[in-house]
Each structure stands twice: as C-alpha cells, then as structure tokens.
C-alpha cells in the first residue's frame, strides 16, 4: 500500500468521529518503525493532535523524533533487554516480561512504567481464570511498586 492510500484510509477513519479536532492516532502492529517513514509521519502529524508509536524499542526510527516533539510519542513494550529508541513511557506485559521491569527502571528511571496483563484468551490457550490471575499480578505490582495499570478496555467490552 503506498503512502497516499494510507493517508486516504486514515483520513476516512478520522472523519467518522463526531468531534475530530482532538483525535489521536496509535500506530502499532508488527514493528512500525520498520515501515514508518518521515514523509508519512509528517503527513499524519498534520492530521492528528497526537501520535503514539507502539514499538518494542529494538529499531531506531528513520526520522528525528525531536522534530515532532509534543505530537509524536514512543510507547515501548520491550521484548528483550535492548531498547535503542528513547521511550516516552514503557509498557511491560505481565507475567511474560516481568523480568524486564528492573531493567526498565534502571535504564529509564524518569519514564512511567505501565503493567498490562497478558490475555491468554486472545491466544486460544487460556481461560478467564488465567486472565484474572494476570490482572491480579498487575494490580499487586501497582499497589506494591507504584507502576501504572494498562488494561485493554476494548477486550473487556467485547470489541475486536
């Protein structure tokens, strides 16, 4: 899909909101920093109030992040102990990546850290009890260590 087609599709979604003056965009899926170009990002920043790029942090962006300061943010969900792009906040999947919490705290002490329960139901290998157990682990980390809780609300209200 070429850049013009991407921009056209995104504009269609943005216009479907009643008040589209303060709409943000989350770019996710696979590793967006492998595909996201400076030209595409420049066009998208003209259309949205903010853009959150969800990355695993192992790829350097192909653009100068500081050119987009105050509009473009990096949400890093690390998979390994190697983050090469500067995060604005960090999301750690619990229990799968609990071992990365200390690494993130030591390397990025100024960054808010969110804990998000892994949804085993999404992987067809779990149960509601397993998901609730992961939620409980996150709540305990929030209460005992001061992390922030990230819940995928769309799953709770049964949206795809």
Image (cartoon, grey):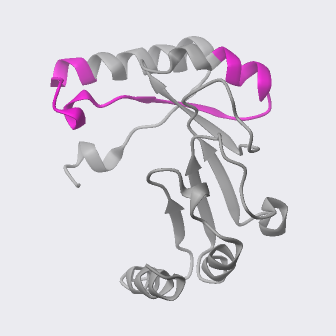
Is residue 25 or residue 79 the one in the foreground?
Answer: 79
Tell me residue 22's x, y (percent).
Answer: 56, 75
**Residue 101 location, quadrant:** top right
Tell me residue 153's x, y (percent).
Answer: 34, 46
Relative to 70, 125 lies left or right: left
Asked if the magenta segment contains residue 130, the reply would be: yes
Is residue 37 or residue 66 the one in the foreground?
Answer: 37
Residue in view at x 61 percent, y 46 percent = 75
Residue in view at x 77 percent, y 19 percent = 106
Tell me residue 58's x, y (percent).
Answer: 65, 40
Quadrant into which the N terminus falls: bottom left
Residue 80 vertical position relative to residue 18 in the rendered view, above or below: above
Residue 53 vertical position relative to residue 24 in the rendered view, above or below: above
Number of numbered markers: 0
Residue in view at x 59 percent, y 82 percent = 47
**Residue 129 location, quadrant:** top left
Q: Which residues are magenta?
A: 102-131
Tell me residue 73's x, y (percent).
Answer: 68, 56
Quadrant into which the C terminus falls: bottom left
Residue 42 vertical position relative to residue 87 in the rendered view, above or below: below
Relative to 140, 82 lies left or right: right
Relative to 60, 129 lies left or right: left
Is residue 10 or residue 5 the one in the foreground?
Answer: 5
């Amino acid at each position: 899909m070429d850049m013009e087609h991407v921009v056209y599709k995104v504009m269609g979604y943005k216009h479907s909101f009643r008040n589209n003056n303060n709409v943000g965009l989350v770019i996710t899926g696979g590793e967006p920093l492998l595909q996201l170009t400076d030209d595409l990002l420049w066009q998208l920043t003209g259309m949205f109030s903010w853009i959150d790029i969800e990355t695993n942090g192992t790829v350097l962006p192909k653009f100068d992040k500081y050119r987009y300061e105050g509009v473009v943010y990096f949400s890093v969900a690390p998979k390994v102990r190697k983050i090469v792009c500067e995060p604005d906040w960090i999301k750690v999947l619990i229990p799968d990546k609990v071992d990365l919490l200390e690494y993130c705290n030591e390397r990025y002490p100024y960054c808010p850290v969110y804990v998000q329960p892994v949804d085993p139901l999404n992987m067809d290998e779990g149960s509601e009890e397993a998901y609730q157990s992961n939620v409980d682990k996150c709540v305990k980390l929030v209460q005992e260590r001061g992390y922030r809780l990230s819940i995928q609300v769309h799953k709770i209200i049964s949206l795809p």
